[in-house]
Amino acid sequence: MTSEGETLLKEELQRLKFEERPSVIDAIATAREFGDLKENAEYHAAKEQQSYNEGRIEEINDIIARANVIDITKMTNEGKVIFGATVYLTNLDTGEKINYKIVGKDEADLKKKLIFSQSPIGKGLIGKNKNDLIVVDKSAEAKAIKIGMSYQSAISMHGDVIVIKGDYVMYGEVHQKNMLSLNHISPKIECGGLGMVFVDITGLEMLYKNMDNLKQKILSSIPQEFNPRVGIADNKFFSYIAALESAPNQCMDYIDSVEFRSKIGVDILPIASTNKAKLKELGINNLTQIADWNINLLQIQFGIKEGKKILDNSGLKLISAENLDDAAKKIVEAIK
């Protein structure tokens, strides 16, 4: 919530408590003088108004007690749309100009051009630069285009999609800042590519008293508008999978189970695309299914190094040597 929003709520609270409340009490007392309360419209209207006012007073008190008030005048802004900013927009189709202020949920009011930061329009605006193009169209075609989708996939779904060139210099600078923030938590960090960092947290739970505190420290070190996802596991690959399965601004521990692995398709494996296609031809579509194959057979199909990599990343118990004949039959049948 903005500090301005908090001030407005406090002003409303004062008005309800010291102006509206006494006025309603007087209205109820006056209505009582009219006689029979069962058919006294003035009395019932006054009681309804009293119920609304008291409910609103309780609601505002609760909102203020829980509010995380942000003084936007003390926030640093590098030219991007941030919480509390007033944004001026132009509809490219109609030429219509409009402005919105991005605020918290409890102060949002579309009629006053105050929009919630997590609303569709708010999400579309946060993080954008001046003159950026945003899409707030909620058509089926627009909904189908997702973050991370390839250019070809997007074009196939929506032929007139507008592509904006990414600013990879800026992305790299932001990524470096995030790495420095994480380096304050652990001296052992490794870049896994743009937007991905591996952090060795071995033993750090003692420093932060418990694992929950450590997880929160990691999440809070990355700006919330980036929607960081954190995965915890015994190795980098499974921590990456856990992060993918995690919700934005949340942390997930990797759960070593067949059910969990069955949700993870082979496309996520760090192997050549041709080998991913070959796995699917063999009927191997997820990590759990890799457990049905013997290491010797996979190494025959993919080579010693690549076969071992596939099995290592599956993390599952492999077929024993005595079951090699059954596994071989399965491969033969799959290849036919």
Image: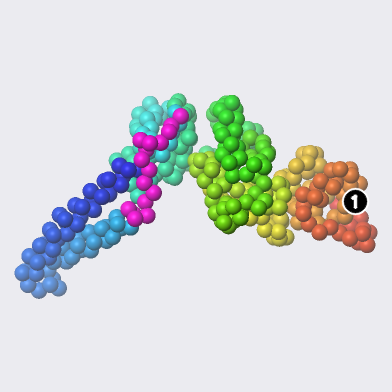
Indicate whether 244 appears above or below 260.
above
Q: Position of residue 327 (x, y in %)?
A: 89, 57
Q: For numbered disc 1, what is the local secondary structure?
A: helix
The residue at which mark 1 appears reads as 297
User: Quick one: 256 or 280, which is closer to the camera?
Assistant: 256
**Quick check: can you spot residue 184?**
yes
Indicate whether 285 appears above or below 197.
below
Q: Position of residue 301 (x, y in %)?
A: 89, 46
Q: Residue furthest front?
A: 207
Is 155 included in the stretch rendered in magenta?
A: no
Task: Describe residue 104's horizontal placement relative to residue 236 as left or right.
Answer: left
Q: Which amino acid is tagged 1? A: Leu
Q: Residues within 10 Å of mark 1 (few under 14, many from 20)?
A: some
Over which residues does the magenta segment extend? 63-78
**Quick check: can you spot residue 42?**
no
Q: How many marks?
A: 1
Q: Position of residue 227 (x, y in %)?
A: 53, 43
Task: Describe residue 232's horizontal placement relative to residue 305 as left or right.
Answer: left
Seen at 57% across and 29% down, the residue is 173
Indicate whether 165 appears above or below 280.
above
Task: Describe residue 316's horizontal placement relative to residue 205 as left or right.
Answer: right
Seen at 42% across and 43% down, the residue is 117
Indicate whether 200 appears above or below 155.
below
Seen at 19% across and 60% down, the residue is 49
Q: Position of residue 4 (x, y in %)?
A: 30, 42
Quarter residue 62 falls in: bottom left
